[in-house]
Image (cartoon, rainbow, N blue to C red):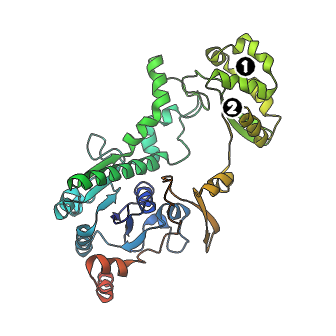
Amino acid sequence: MTGTTVLDLGQIYNGPYCGYLLAMAGARVIKVEPPGGERMRGREDTVVSYPFMMLNGNKETVTLNLKSDTGREVLRGLVRRADVLLENFAPGTLEGRGIGARALTAINPRLIYAAGTGFGGTGPHRDYRAMDITIQAMTGVMSITGHDGEPPLKAGPAMCDILGGVHLYAAITTALVRRERTGQGAVLDVAMQDAVFPSLTSALGAWYVSGGQSRRTGNHHHAAAVAPYNVYAASDGHVAIICVRERHWLALLDAMGKPELADDPRFADRATRARNMAATDAVVDAWTSTLPRVEVFRVCQQHEVPCAPVQSLADVLNDPHLLERGALAKVAHEHYGEVALPSTPLRFQDLDPPAVSLPRNAGADNVPVYGDLLGLSADEVASLKDAGAI
């Protein structure tokens, strides 16, 4: 993506993650923040927040006051030189300031204007306040998460924000390919709700089979059609085990030293095991609970049984696999010490991703960026700062 210039007006998680993927793919990504910096940086008297570090490295950084006439005029100048502008403001926010998709694509018809939203730029839910938890609620994720008889739960990670950012990246790259062939720019509308819906695949499959909403199943299969399919206690934590195919179950019996259970009528096949789920889980738990996680994992791997230890955040941050692959990089930070930051999941066999870097201070690139793209001198950039435009 070398040679592609992106104006990243993203905030919080959704837009910035899209911008980070573009930066790691080789684009020149210029993060545009309000004077003083995006609020997720942290308060001025504190260090930059870890989430901000995760999503905003490898970008140039400028400040720009989009609430001022001069600031908006500066943005229009930048748009003339940009390939992509991405933002995840509430729908209509930039339009109301005269710098929405219609106005900016009129300035630069080749511009790819990419908007990440909660519910989309059209439709009756367009103006609903969108945060990860509200998207999880509206999309049905919470209705299927948790245990039967207990209140719905949100998924732990910010899955809607990140899935929205990934889909926004995909839309931008698709639009760039089209522009390469046709010369045509694009206005993109990528909603988190739309992006999350496909993750309901298993739950919706169960819904159509049963004809209605099934009970929440905790760590069990949504349709209660597979057993074992659960998280089991180990002597030092928990492990996840699933037997999708009959050979997985027979291999697990060998791993547990219980081959005779292959002839037990309660476990005759997958459907029977699912009907006798409590007994199936009890057999597995009786074995796993006597061993440490790493041993259960080792034995299951040896027998080709799908299994994984439930890792803590500390485990993940120091996962030797992620570190060896370069999916995580350890970076020195003046306050936190050594921090683990993500690289890019987008890998090419013949290309190494760029080294992971920490975000730059807000406005650190005002002089070089405004000088390069707008031809402004250092004194002219200083004047913009004095005027409150940057």
In the image, is 104 to the left or to the right of 146? left
* x then y, percent, for residue 272: 65, 14
Residue found at x 51% / y 23%: 214
* Residue that mark 2 sits on: 305
Residue type highlighted by circle 2: Val
Please indicate whether residue 173 sits to the left or right of residue 151 in the image.
left
Rendered residue at 51%/31% (across/down): 144
Name the outermost residue toward the front.
350
Identify residue for label 1: 279
Drawn side of residue 243 relative to residue 49, left or right: right
Of all residues, the one furthest to the top in this rendering is 265
Decide if residue 197 is in sight here: yes
Q: Is residue 159 above or below residue 273?
A: below
Label annotation for residue 249: none
Which comes before the other along the chain, label 2 or label 1? 1
Label 2 neighbour load within 10 Å: few <14, some 14-19, many 20+: many
**Above or below: residue 25 compared with residue 287:** below
Answer with the quarter of the image where residue 7 lies: bottom left
Secondary structure, mark 1, is helix
In space, the residues marked 2 and 1 are separated at their CA atoms by 19 Å
Location of residue 19 in the rendering, given as x and y in whole percent from the top left corner: 41, 60
- The quarter of the picture where residue 250 lies is top right
Query: Where residue 130 sits in the image (x, y, percent)?
Result: 39, 48
Question: Mark 1 is on which residue type?
Answer: Ala
